[in-house]
Image (cartoon, rainbow, N blue to C red):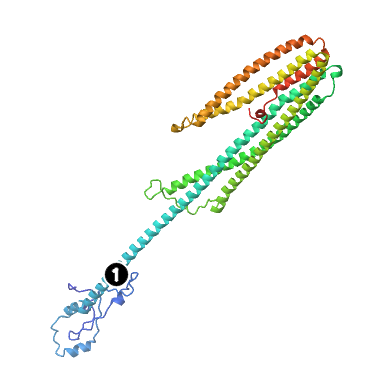
């Protein structure tokens, strides 16, 4: 049977001991029964655990008889002494308090250091994260600025290229119009050659008029060939311009898409709704260029477009020179042929004057009247363009905005110019009608004299007919492609 307050391993369960033997000093059982556990950073902290067992010094039975010679029973029962020896000592109590306090102090110290380090680490990481985010945002802003720069360069170059392409197409149309305008005078020159074959007898001569007509036909054909080749070159250059335009438009479209994406990324904040986790996206690298090659790509597109524009400008200049030169050459030859015609007509008229003075005078008046009519028609045609210019200027100045719509000196001058040119045209047209009436009267008198001079009249009629056909020669603006 066990007593309360004792353990099964108490000393009374073993060999009986003498109550007179002094109590042995308690020995620490901490290191024997419990392995200390050190927390991280708690190297000097000794764990403490109260003793559950104690050691009892064994005493031989002969020793018990030595201390109790009389054989009387001890005053304190052995079981009670055993229970008293199972209590903690004062040293254990102080040691336990000391260990507990040191352990608590160490725990608080390391907990304080951990909290401080954690707060400092969190602040450092927060600052680093914020700085990295600001750096990324600044880099995105710089990238957007670079994209804006190249967008403006590409847009400007594309606009210039479109204008140049349009101007080149206009030059091509001018060439085609000029080639078309040459068909009429060429056909007239050929008809004049064929028609002059109807001259009779001695008047069927190879004169200067025929030579100039043949030369005129050759010049027309040569000019048409030159302009046609130039038009082919322009068509080829237009294809190059369209390729450069496509490259610029594609690059500009890509720049616009990249600008939209980077602006969207630039405007993202930590509070944005569209942000999400994309695990592993930083490991996927789908880039195909670096900033150097990216800039070189756009620079090459711009340089290619500039080269195409330079070639287009050169072609347009060549076109302008070709049109001006051909127009001048054709006009000089036309005038030379007309002069030859007039000279030949004068010769026929002189011959007819020798045959009949009166008929010669009539014919001379006819020639002079025709020249007057031609000059009047040319003068009227020459006045139409200044009138168009003045009226166009007036019409253009009516679109001046707001207070700029001023009745200034140019306005008065333009109005006066329009009225003056209009009066001049009315006077010239009236004079032209009178000249035509006079010509009709002279032709009526001439018809009465043609019976006597049939051969000369036939030659004169042929040349006169050629001159009438040649009055349809196009003006200079039409020859250089302006319709």
- Does residue 254 sit above or below 166 in this rendering? below
Quadrant where the N terminus is found in the figure: bottom left
- In the displayed structure, 46 sits above or below 153; it is below
Q: Is residue 302 visible?
A: yes
Residue 376 % position (x, y): 66, 21
Q: Is 282 on the left-hand or right-hand side of 320?
A: left
Query: As drawn, is 473 to the left or to the right of 389?
Result: right
Displayed quadrant of residue 448: top right
Question: Which residue does the image show at 76% across and 10% down from the upper left?
Answer: 447
Q: Nearer the viewer, residue 251 or 446?
A: 446
Q: Which residue is mark 1?
A: 109
Q: Residues within 10 Å of mark 1 (few under 14, many from 20)?
A: some
In front: 458, or 421?
421
90 displayed left or right of 144 = left
Residue at the spot x=81%, y=17% of the render?
Answer: 459
- The answer to which of 364 and 134 lies nearer the viewer is 364
């Amino acid at each position: 049977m066990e007593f309360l307050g004792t353990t099964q391993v108490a000393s009374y369960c073993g060999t009986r001991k003498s109550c007179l033997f002094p109590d042995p000093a308690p020995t620490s059982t901490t290191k024997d029964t419990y392995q200390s556990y050190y927390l991280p950073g708690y190297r000097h902290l000794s764990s403490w655990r109260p003793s559950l067992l104690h050691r009892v010094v064994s005493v031989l039975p002969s020793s018990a008889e030595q201390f109790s010679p009389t054989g009387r029973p001890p005053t304190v029962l052995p079981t009670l002494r055993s229970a008293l020896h199972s209590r903690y000592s004062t040293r254990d109590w102080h040691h336990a308090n000391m260990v507990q306090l040191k352990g608590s102090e160490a725990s608080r110290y390391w907990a304080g250091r951990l909290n401080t380090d954690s707060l400092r680490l969190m602040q450092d990481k927060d600052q680093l994260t914020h700085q990295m985010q600001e750096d990324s945002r600044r880099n995105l802003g710089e990238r957007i600025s670079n994209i804006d720069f190249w967008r403006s360069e590409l847009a400007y170059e594309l606009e210039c290229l479109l204008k140049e392409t349009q101007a080149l197409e206009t030059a091509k149309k001018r060439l085609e119009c000029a080639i078309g305008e040459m068909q009429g005078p060429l056909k007239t020159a050929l008809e004049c050659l064929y028609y002059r074959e109807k001259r009779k007898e001695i008047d069927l001569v190879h004169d200067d008029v025929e030579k100039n007509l043949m030369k005129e036909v050759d010049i027309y054909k040569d000019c048409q060939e030159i302009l046609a080749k130039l038009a082919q070159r322009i068509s080829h250059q237009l294809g190059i311009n369209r390729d450069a335009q496509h490259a610029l438009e594609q690059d500009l479209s890509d720049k616009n898409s990249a600008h939209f994406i980077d602006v969207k990324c630039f405007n993202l904040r930590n509070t944005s709704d569209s942000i999400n986790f994309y695990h592993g996206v930083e490991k996927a690298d789908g880039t195909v260029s670096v900033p150097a090659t990216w800039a070189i790509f756009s620079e090459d597109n711009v340089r290619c477009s500039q080269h195409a524009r330079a070639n287009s400008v050169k072609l347009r200049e060549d076109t302008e020179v070709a049109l001006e030169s051909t127009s001048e050459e054709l006009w000089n030859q036309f005038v030379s042929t007309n002069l030859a015609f007039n000279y030949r007509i004068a010769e026929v008229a002189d011959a007819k004057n020798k045959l009949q003075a009166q008929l010669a005078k009539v014919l001379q008046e006819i020639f002079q009247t025709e020249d007057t009519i031609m000059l009047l028609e040319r003068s009227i045609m020459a006045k139409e363009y200044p009138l168009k210019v003045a009226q166009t200027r007036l019409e253009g100045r009516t679109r001046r905005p707001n207070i700029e719509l001023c009745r200034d000196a140019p306005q008065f001058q333009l109005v006066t110019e329009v009225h003056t040119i209009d009066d001049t045209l009315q006077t010239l047209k009236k004079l032209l009608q009178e000249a035509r009436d006079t010509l009709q009267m002279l032709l009526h008198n001439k018809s009465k004299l043609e019976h006597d001079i049939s051969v000369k009249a036939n030659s004169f009629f042929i040349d006169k007919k050629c001159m009438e056909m040649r009055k349809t020669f196009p003006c200079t603006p039409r020859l250089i492609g302006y319709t």
